[in-house]
Amino acid sequence: DELQYCMQLSSTMNSPLPPPPLSFDHDDIIGGSTGRRRRRNKNRNTNNPLHSIQSTIDNICTQLNDKLSQCNTQLRNNQLLPPPHILLPSVISGTLAFYATSFSSQYIQYKLLKLSTGTRPMIIPISVGVATVAMGSWMGHLAGLGTVAAAAATAKCTDRTSSSSRMQWNRRATPDFLEQCNSLLEEKILPMKDAACRTVHEMTRPMTIATNTNNNNNRRMQQERKEAWFHAARICIIGILTYKTLFRSNFMSLSPSSYTARGSFARKGIPIPKSSSSSRSSSMIPSSFNYATKSQREKLHQIGSRFGCHTCGSRLLFRSRRLLPNTTKKMIFHGDHIPPVSVAKQINNRWYNRKLGRTVAQRFYPQCTDCSNKQGGLLSRAVNAGHRNLHAAGGGSESHFHGWRMRVGHLTGGLVAVVSTVGVGNDDARWLGSSSEEEEAEVLVHSSRDRIRSIQYWLEDLLYDAKRTMSNVWNGR
């Protein structure tokens, strides 16, 4: 019996232990508030909108990086940019076309419309600036197409006339200079001009089509006109986005600069703290009307050296420079109150501002001595004449015309011209070997429209993917 008991005890000790009893929460069993809260927290952690938004942004960034890497690969293989003899002339011609459009728009604003950066409401100069950028982008696009067509015509003329030119040079060792000029004009310049004009005409021809009947031919012409106008709209949108996002330019900078408001070249200003005095007497000058302090003048010097005078844009690189008081640093810009002191006082003394106790906010902007003196003279004459709206005294015909000055935003036309010629190198065999000159222009125009349309489709797909991801996030999928 003892031996049997010992054998049972050893078998019991070697057997595995039973699992512990399961513990259940009472709220989980009966579906109480605690269980619902836990399930709700679990779903909230699973479908967190912040994580989904972050994943959407990461997806967009990944697609953009893939696109940029593809472009870099094509750049290394010389598959993306046009040949050098087409790229540089396209950039120059597009930039000059945008510059000419900007100059014409600003001259019309200065002479006819009497607009400036101080025109109220502000939507007027902003709208004119948007229209100017759109028109300048379209002109830069046409200039780029004309340049590509002219370069292609030059290449074909060179191939045709190389042998005959060598024969003529061998016949006459020293040809006449006038004959050389005439041959150059007939063999190179005139074909380039004809090819450029032909291509630009082919691009703009459908936009002037007028259809009155409903036959099949007019339906085709109407579809062609619609496609031409849509292409122009795409070019304008690309130019506006490039001008605003890439070059970070202001649409109001395309208007003449007002002497009593922020100028066309104003980028950064120094806020002026308002007076802490509770007195509203017009005889007392608030502290905000004082001159700039030493630290503020140093900041204005840095801003002016980088961006120039906010009215005329001059950086005064070749002017004499004064030293700041008690320092060795040079000061070339004044601290201009915007709005000026007399304008701010007139605005503060209006009855509704006095009733509400409101005062206008001012900022310091760098201004050169010439513009500062002219501003002071304009305001002095306006105050002596009893002008009721001093804010408008420095605008209109008294504003500063800066249409001659080149701006970084003018490169928008050159960039649009390059975008409109991207991929032309892949189509050289197709449109350089065409049977007629009209066919060459048609192929070039259609190639440009296809390229711009492909950019639109790529952006639409990118935005559609982002929209679908965001909708899935908010629907809890």
Image: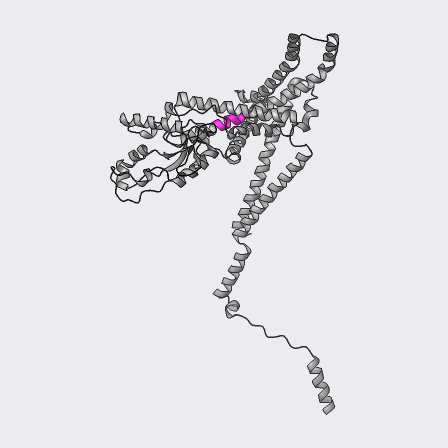
Q: Residue at x 70, y 85 (%)?
A: 9
From this view, report whether residue 203 is shown above or below residue 333. Answer: above
From this view, report whether residue 12 is shown above or below residue 470. Answer: below
Corner quadrant of residue 335: top left
Q: Which quarter of the rendered picture does the N terminus lie within? A: bottom right
Residue extending farthest bottom: 1
Corner quadrant of residue 292: top left
Residue 471 lies in magenta, yes or no?
no
Magenta-drawn stretch, dominant element (helix, strand or loop): helix
Q: Residue at x 40, y 35 (%)?
A: 365
Q: In the figure, is residue 422 to the left or right of 366?
A: right
Q: Position of residue 275 (x, y in %)?
A: 31, 42
Q: Does residue 267 appear in the picture of this structure? A: no
Residue 140 lies in magenta, yes or no?
yes
The residue lying toward the viewer, choosing from 60 and 5, is 60
Q: Position of residue 55 (x, y in %)?
A: 57, 49
Numbered label tally: 0
* Highlighted magenta segment, given as a residue range: 132-141
Q: Position of residue 219 (x, y in %)?
A: 57, 24
Corner quadrant of residue 358: top left
From this view, report whether residue 295 is shown above or below residue 177. Answer: below
Q: Position of residue 476 (x, y in %)?
A: 53, 52
The residue lying toward the viewer, choosing from 180 and 358, is 180
The residue lying toward the viewer, choosing from 288 and 249, is 288
Q: Residue at x 73, y 86 (%)?
A: 7
Q: In the figure, is residue 103 to the left or right of 172?
A: left
Q: Does residue 408 appear in the picture of this structure? A: yes
Q: How is the image coloured?
A: one colour
